[in-house]
Image (tube, grey):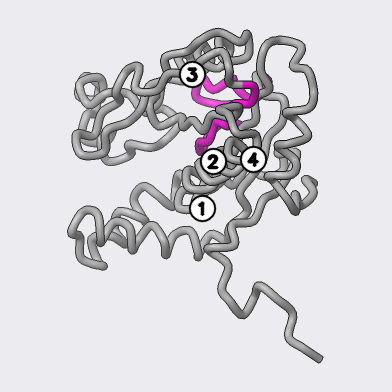
Amino acid sequence: MPAQLQDPVAHLREWLHKPAPQGRWLIGVSGLPGAGKSTLVQRWAQEINAYMRDESVAALSMDGFHLTKATLARFPDPQAAFARRGAPWTFDPHALRAHVMALRAGESVAWPGFEHAVGDPVPGALQVGPQIRVALVEGLYLLHDQHGWDVASCFDEHWFVDVEMDTAMARLENRHMAANQQSRAQARARLDGNDHLNATIAAGARAKAHWLVSNPALIPPAARAAPAL
């Protein structure tokens, strides 16, 4: 079983002091939807870059490898494809692997983003220059090994943001209500029909990670410290 990583930022500093044999160090950050992966990798990268006083760490997401809406519309059952968008088979893992391997080689890489207002990837939204020595890549399925996924071996280390399922789903429910103007019933229907299914798939890879990382923002205050005796 993976151990708990108590200080992710200090651990990243250790990677920066090691010479990367192939160009860059790559760390995959997985976890449930709603676990806060994107926020955490951005925060860690900002802290390290401020400490180093340069741009040494890049925070990247696999969201830019969603299949486009035009591609989903060509599926045998487009309605089902759109309903399950976010499942492993609604991404392009081969393109992700190609970009990750280019990162590993130390190349300058045009990394895609994702425009949530439009609902489609944005090619070349981020530029990863040669000064980047550690790339943090976050996503649900970096440890997944079915549906054409084969990117786990491209990384030097894997972290899993360890958040309780109920906590992650409650956060997603509130996010759907706020971002999409959905009622609570609509948000819960989306959870039941899609998000919880994706979360179960992502959770199945937890044991494959090297480290577990907590997200303090999603830990109830009462659980953060033992009561005084």
Q: How busy is the neighbourhood of tag 3: few (under 14 within 10 Å), some, or many (20 plus)?
A: many
Q: Earlier in the sequence, mark 4 or mark 3?
A: 4
Q: Disc 2 and disc 1: Cα gap in Å?
A: 19 Å
Residue at position x 49%, y 30% in the image: 60
Callout 1 environment at 10 Å: few (<14), some (14 to 19), or many (20+)? Answer: many
In front: label 2 or label 1? 2
Q: Nearer the viewer, residue 51 or 44?
A: 51
Q: Which corner quadrant of the image does residue 102 belong to?
A: top right
Question: Which class describes the residues within 10 Å of circle 2: few (<14), some (14-19), or many (20+)?
Answer: some
State how far apart marks 1 and 3 are (Cα).
Answer: 25 Å
- Disc 3: which residue: 128
124 sits left or right of 215 in the view: left
Using a 10 Å C-alpha cutoff, classify the residue at mark 4 as few (fewer than 14 neighbours), some (14 to 19) or many (20 or more). Answer: few
Q: Amino acid at mark 1?
A: Ala
Residue 7 appears in the rendering:
yes
Callout 1: helix, strand or loop? loop
- Between the residue at mark 3 and the residue at mark 2, the CA separation in whole angstroms equals 15 Å
Of circles 1 and 3, the one toward us is 3
Q: In this figure, which residue is indicated by the disc labeled 2?
A: 46
- Left or right: 56, with 17 as reference point: left
Tag 3: amino acid: Val
Residue 63: image quadrant is top left
Q: Position of residue 202 (x, y in %)?
A: 55, 42
Please give the name of the residue rendered at 68% of the width and 22% of the height, measured from the top-left corner. Answer: 25
The residue depicted at 47 percent of the width and 13 percent of the height is 109
Q: Earlier in the sequence, mark 3 or mark 2?
A: 2
- Residue ID at (67%, 11%): 23
Circle 1 sits on which residue? 35
Give the extent of the magenta segment: 133-153
User: CA separation, marks 4 and 1?
Assistant: 26 Å
Q: Position of residue 134 (x, y in %)?
A: 64, 26
